[in-house]
Image (cartoon, helix red, strand yellow):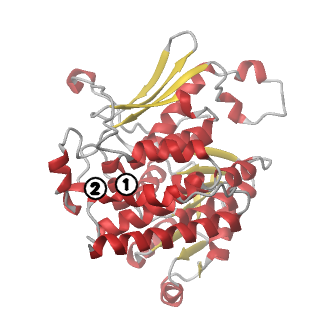
Amino acid sequence: MKSLSLLGSTGSIGIQTLEVLRAEPESWDVVALGVGRSASKLLEQAREFQPQMVVVADPEMVSELQADLPGIQVASGSEALVEAAAMGEVVVNAVVGFAGLPVTLAALEAGRRLALANKESLIAAGPLVQRARQTFGAELLPVDSEHCAIHQCLRANSRADIDHFNTDVNTDTDVNTERVARIVLTASGGPFRGCTTEELATVTVQSALSHPTWEMGAKITVDSSTLMNKGLEVIEANELFGVDFERIEVVVHPQSVVHSMVEYTDGATVAQLSMPDMRLCIGYALAYPDRITTPFGQINWQTLGRLEFESPNTELFPCLELAYEAGRLGGTAPALLNAANEVAVQAFLDEQIRWMEIPHVLQDVLDSYDGTAADSLGAVMQVDRQARMQAERIVTTMSAS
Ligand code: MG
């Protein structure tokens, strides 16, 4: 049995992680839970899983929760978060947004297996995460469905048998990109696939929040309606697998059954298929190189029907190209884009700006990139703060007009 820290336990991925743990009760022991904003949900989870430690976002919640959870340490603040992240042999980072960065760094620097559902930390602070990833024992397993698929497809070209006697390498060598011609990321296209400019001009919060194939949190659902989610995933793929942007392609696949593909130099394409179910990806990241024994997302081939593929419309969905641009610029450009996007999405959810204005906020902030390197946490956090302030100013100007 392995100890496990789950941070972001009351969000969509957190809840599904607990479903996987319930299905495989012999494999993992929850030692830390937390950072949920929903105290009642967190209390319920802590009572069921009996962790050693619970971390809450709001310090005012500590004493109240502590009274309800005798024998469990209840804490708040960034130090508690870092402590909780280093506690488990396996750490699931399901925190939403840039706030997940300290968890990512703490888990890797403690030499843990990190199951990463927080793509923002990898995008905003790629070089820092890469450095932390070099820590002895540290492993980074993506929980995002596309990257989980790519990870599986890359194992089709595994050099594990060759490297078997080389004790210097960790299990990451199971994932070999040497003969990769390109990575093909699939995108569902979101709720507005095929819409006209006129239709996109009148998009409401409610319509942006109704995703056709995946049930996810609000931020990522809006990101997926603008294709920004796919853009962030392109940067994420570059960071995770070290494949350059010229060899990462996006194709729209409305059924979300093919979760991504890898084409090899001999022309062969390897794909991973399943019904959309994040529990499969979570279980994969936890159990790798083994697999869990509970099936999630099995396909019924008799009723599956048609699988379609088409090009993304980058004119109506410019966020995808903006992400490629930020990724190629490197340095803190992805951090700028990510911060601007978090502000723009929140402003859209608060009905301050229109859906079609989201990419304008991102473009304006990205245009101000001055070549700052992402070489320290301080530098990244400062860029993040400045980009948020700039994006907020742009939003205010937009909502006033
Ligand atoms: Mg995804």
Mark 1 CB within 8 Å of ligand 1: no
The residue positioned 23% from the left and 45% from the top of the image is: 192
Q: Is 380 or 96 nearer to us in this picture?
A: 380
Q: Looking at the picture, how far across and down is residue 383, in whole percent? A: 61, 65
Q: Residue 179 is drawn in which quadrant?
A: top right
What amino acid type is highlighted by mark number 2? Met
Which quarter shows the C terminus? Answer: bottom left
Within-10-Å neighbours for mark 2: few <14, some 14–19, many 20+: some
- Residue that numbered label 2 is attached to: 356
Q: Looking at the picture, how far across and down is residue 81, in whole percent? A: 62, 71
352 left or right of 394 in image: left
The residue positioned 28% from the left and 55% from the top of the image is: 356
The residue positioned 61% from the left and 32% from the top of the image is: 243
Q: Is 41 or 321 nearer to us in this picture?
A: 321
State how far apart marks 1 and 2 are (Cα): 7 Å
Q: Looking at the picture, how far across and down is residue 363, in whole percent? A: 44, 55
**Element at badge 2?**
helix
56 left or right of 23 in image: right
In this rendering, is residue 68 above or below 114?
below
What amino acid type is highlighted by mark number 1? Pro
- Residue that numbered label 1 is attached to: 359
Total marks placed: 2
Q: Which dot marks residue 31? A: none
Marks 1 and 2: CB-CB under 8 Å?
Answer: yes
**Element at badge 1?**
helix
Q: Is 54 or 203 nearer to us in this picture?
A: 203
Q: Looking at the picture, how far across and down is residue 278, in whole percent? A: 41, 45
Residue 283 in sight here: no
Residue 100 in sight here: yes
In this rendering, is residue 161 above or below 290?
above
